[in-house]
Amino acid sequence: MSVVHVKINGIPVEVEAGSTVLAAAKAAGVKIPTLCNQEDLKPTASCGLCIVKMEGSPKIQRACASPVQEGASYITDDPELFKARKTVIEMILSTHPAECLTCIRNQNCELQQLAAEFGIREQPFTPRVRRLPKDESSPSIITDPSKCIKCGRCVEVCQDLQGVYALEFIGRGDEVQMVPACGLNLSESPCVKCGQCAAHCPVGAIYERDDTDKVRDAIYDADKIVVANMAPSVRVAIGEGFGLPEGTVTTGKIYTALRQIGFDKVFDTNFAADLTIMEEGNELVHRLTHGGVLPLMTSCCPAWTDYMEKYYPDMIPNFSTAKSPMQMQGAVTKTYWAEKAGIDPSKIVNVAIMPCTAKKFEIGRDSNMSSSGFQDTDISITSRELIRMIKAKGIDFAHLEESDADSPIGEYTGAGTIFGNTGGVMEAAIRTAYFAVTGKELEGVEVDSVRGPEGVRTAVVDVNGLKLKVAIVSGLVNAKQVMEEVRKARAEGAEPPYHFIEVMACKGGCISGGGQPYASNDANRAARTAGLYSDDEHCAKRCSHQNPSIKKIYDEYLGAPLSEKAEELLHTTYQQRPLYK
Amino acid sequence: MAVRNYILVCGGTACESSRSKEILKALQDEAVKQGVADDIQIVQTGCFGFCEQGPIVKVLPEDSFYVKVQPSDAAELIAEHVIKGREVKRLLYDKDKASKHAQVEDIKFYQKQFRIVLRNCGFIDPENINEYIARDGYSGLERALFEMTPEDIINELKTAGLRGRGGAGFPTWMKWNFSRNVESDIKYVVCNADEGDPGAYMDRSTLEGDPHSILEAMTICGKCIGAHQGFIYIRAEYPLAIRRLEIAMKQSRELGLLGKDILGSGFDFDIEIRLGAGAFVCGEETALLQSIMGHRGMPVPRPPFPAVKGLWEKPTVINNVETWANIPVIMHKGGEWFSKIGDADSHGTKVFALTGKICNSGLVEVPMGTTLREIVFDIGGGIANGKKFKAVQTGGPSGGVITSENLDTPIDFGSLIKIGSMMGSGGMIVMDEDDCMVDVAKFYLNFTVDESCGKCMPCRIGGKTMLAILDKITAGNGTMKDMDLLTEIGETMRKSALCALGQTSPNPIISTMRFFRDEYLAHIVDKRCPAGKCKKLVTYTIDPDKCKGCTACARRCPVEAISGSIKQPHKIDTTKCIKCGTCVKVCKFGAISVH
Amino acid sequence: MAKMTLEELRKLRAQKQDDLQKRDIAGKDCQIIVGMGTCGIAAGAKVVLDAFLKELDDEKIENVAVTQTGCMGLCYVEPTIEVVVPGMPDTIYGKVDADVARKIVKEHIVGKKLVTDHIYDRPSVDIMKNGGR
């Protein structure tokens, strides 16, 4: 790596060659205001706020898109730059509804933050807000184009990060909009509801559908038994909403908070993650040993499933028929647990707390989602919604006592908790598949070769002589590459390139899901991932098949993995879906 | 039977006003008097484009060019030139050998234009490759393929001092050299033919009149940088240019001047046409490349510059039509020859589309350094209908106005920037006293606001906000604070917009505010449009002293705003008047005034 | 046409230059060149072209070749045409319509006189005239 020496406002700093001025400034501890720039995305340079000067050059550069030059001295702020930036912010504000108080992004809006930092106290330009109807067609995401500042992040996310192409630039000049093509609404578009657009939107123009009122209504309904189940990645993200360090594991505090909010029972989706491994792991072993369709592909991510059904329907036979942990949890809650607790399942309201906006769609995707005879999961809310509920309830989250989940479908192993990050499902499956194949426990359960933040990671894992070829994908755009490899091998009649493929739609996995607290950057992903791995390390049992409650449910209710009962409750089917309706 | 001499008397507007009709008559009378009426033909012609020296008389076949001819000169012209065959020296323009073009061979002094880019336009049949070849076409390519190394080609361009004609004037050799020096298996050559400035059609005419010059130039560039594929990005609204390019490409391929192993040199190069959908911003090079790649035509940040990372991330040389059209001549006649044309700042020529309130609108090509006055008053024949010159807009919607005080500024890249305009691609719109400069600024801004791609915030919002302020001012609702806001937004856009479209779109406003501040103030303070263009600020009144009460205006007024009895002065009800201007047109007594 | 070598290109150029010099196209010594750019066509150049062809045909004049070229730059007087007749100066006419076209055939081509009121000058000298470097 070659380094470049530059000065930022006189501060000498050494950065990697090819770094942007923005990165160099950050290294020098200087913050340059930005609005369109986002770490996950390549610079579009649309906002014009990060303009800087280079000594000796008459040209004004954009810090986000300009590579540093050896020996250069950059000025990031002077009266001229400040004035231009302030004018740009004032102009943006003149086209943005001044509705901060009723906006979902109140207090975490990047535009609001900039207006505050620049001390905008009056509006010199005549307000000119284009009022456009909201798109509320999707069960997961709502777009409010009136609030859109056209930074272009959502389009870049949808196209470059996710490869979905649901959002496009439409129209030009003042008429430009970031919407699906052909005047369609989101539900008619190829949208897979991953919510990454919402996670990257700097303002309140794209956001999760808020289902918290439905949850409150159920809680305040004396007739209902309201139960919660919390996804793996939620436990390492909620703390951020209350000022705790990124990646802090707050499982016990969340359980307590849920009880204080009024949930009757608090379970954990990690239990169902262990259950998923029992089903999916055995499915893998069965396909490996009985000449089944390979590679097997994971199915726990609803956005990935939607994507496959739209873009790669030819992969349906490769898909694991195992439902996602959330749906397994719902199915066993309203059957196994209801029977054990002697509760009428029609009275149970099962609320899933997820890092994900696509889960809101998944709970009603087809009749398989009502295998208990009722809708297995009634409401799915995101981490962000739960944070708002905790705040609205007036709970001092940071100082809460920890508590345990309710039994028996709240108990989990380390394998279940790492479902929340990329590579985790793979690792959990390997731990159990090894046991299923060899009858022996894997020595040193940590499978380092499948860990890591890369968008595509491949590994060969030795399972007692069987060379298990695996691929791990996060960020949907990366799925294309692997799917094309599979297609090519299939077309050529060659050996499949992999035996098992894990795909999570969001970069880094569920820890960075579309419903998580706003922080789409790699440092945050690393912290949340580390949180989950530490949760894994702290678990007494680290393989799904070792979970006593899992053993119990098979003994008492399901029989064995892939049994008729298990198939009925825990497995599903897939169908090709059109890209455009 | 053909006659001995043809005497051409200029009948252009300017010459006619300086008594060319009388000269014609005097010459005819003298011819009869001196007995040569049957030996010569005296005809009146259109404008010769040298109006400053008018009236002009030209005698053929000697090509003698007489200037400032008076009716009293007729006898001498007939007696000396026609009968004795001796030129009348004192009337010849050629006597002035001190002209600045004197060193340059081949230029006749009576013509201000010098055509390199347009050398073949109007000479050859563009659909016949043989005619192009006959006029030394493809001889530049010959040199490039068989006699020159890539470095020689760069050096030839460097000697020539050719700068990009698309607007910014970046040295062409540097651009080529960047691409040449990048190691890459694939490189591209692109012709930007997405001409879009209002009133500009230089590139269209070049492509229609001389398509092979572009093909030849791109092939030379391919040889120089090591590219084998070229693209011509041309707007779909130019069907004739597209057809002629297609014919030219077909003929070139058949003759082996395009395709594999060109002229047996072993060098391969071919060109494809890509049609643009008419977005102005696609003339911006990064947006154009996006469009070629099938993406939405929106600018992307530079660096990386296309010369290093362009189409599909490969080094790409992109030049505009006019730049390309210079290349074959430079390769054929040499950079040395080219460098002698023009002035110290800029070499060669520049093509302008001269339009607006001008007598001789047209496509003109002049050596760099020619003054605006020469273009407007000599080539263009001055302002139409005897009105007063007010300003010229160069650089289209990215440029600024040039006023009469700067008419003697030499036209080159540096000088135009100094006076707040820019070369641009070559639109030149002349305005007279009837043009309201606030309205003109609004016109250009309206264009750029319409054509903004919408990607970057300073351009998208800034342009629209400025337009709203101009609307306010032209409606009589402006305040002095609006002037400050216009300056503030303009400065912000210049600094923070992503591409040249956004950075330069405030120029017409900034420039008119600088040179015609009084007109802005008239709109804002006096609530008056001096040129009578801004409808909301104009009132129509009838001068009772001039009105004869003919009722013509009252009968034609579409909203019955005019009342009065026969032979009595009429009156206009300003509350009803829609300011359509009909009454002014029908009044025979000039009694109706617009304020 | 077959693909050429360098020698063949040079031979072709010399031959065509000769033709152009003689202004001789397939035995026709007079030429009418019509400016057929978008501007010319929009101003009526096609009608003018047709008028020339018809008039030459009607008058059974066979030594005149009618060809097209691009824009001459004289936009304010489109359509523009150039007439080349041996022994007469090459002449550019502007504001030509069908009537003027017929007049040009009768007066200029046949009568060897220039047609008044429509003559314009080529705006520039020809830099390629003397060829070479």
Image (tube, coloured by chain):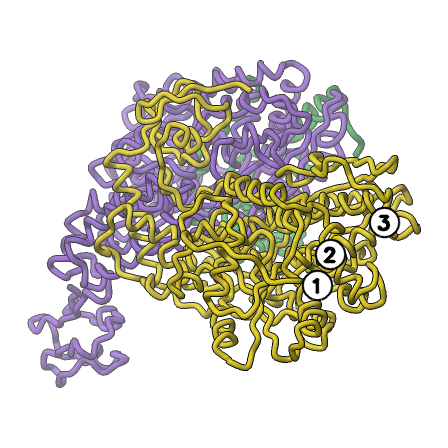
Chain colours: A yellow, B purple, C green
Quadrant for the C terminus of chain A, please: bottom right
Q: Residue at x 60, y 36 (%)?
A: B311
Which chain hosts label 3? A
Q: Which mark is residue A285?
A: 3
Quadrant for the N terminus of chain A, please: top right
Question: Gap in Å between the C-alphas at discs 1 and 2?
Answer: 7 Å
Residue type indicated by callout 2: Thr
Residue type indicated by callout 3: Val
| Local secondary structure at mark 3 | helix
In the image: residue B290, left or right of residue B537: right
Marks 1 and 3 belong to one chain: yes
Residue type indicated by callout 1: Met
**According to the image, label 1 marks what residue?**
A328
Which chain hosts label 1? A
* N-terminal-most mark, 1 or 2: 2
Task: Say if residue B260 shows up in the picture.
Answer: yes
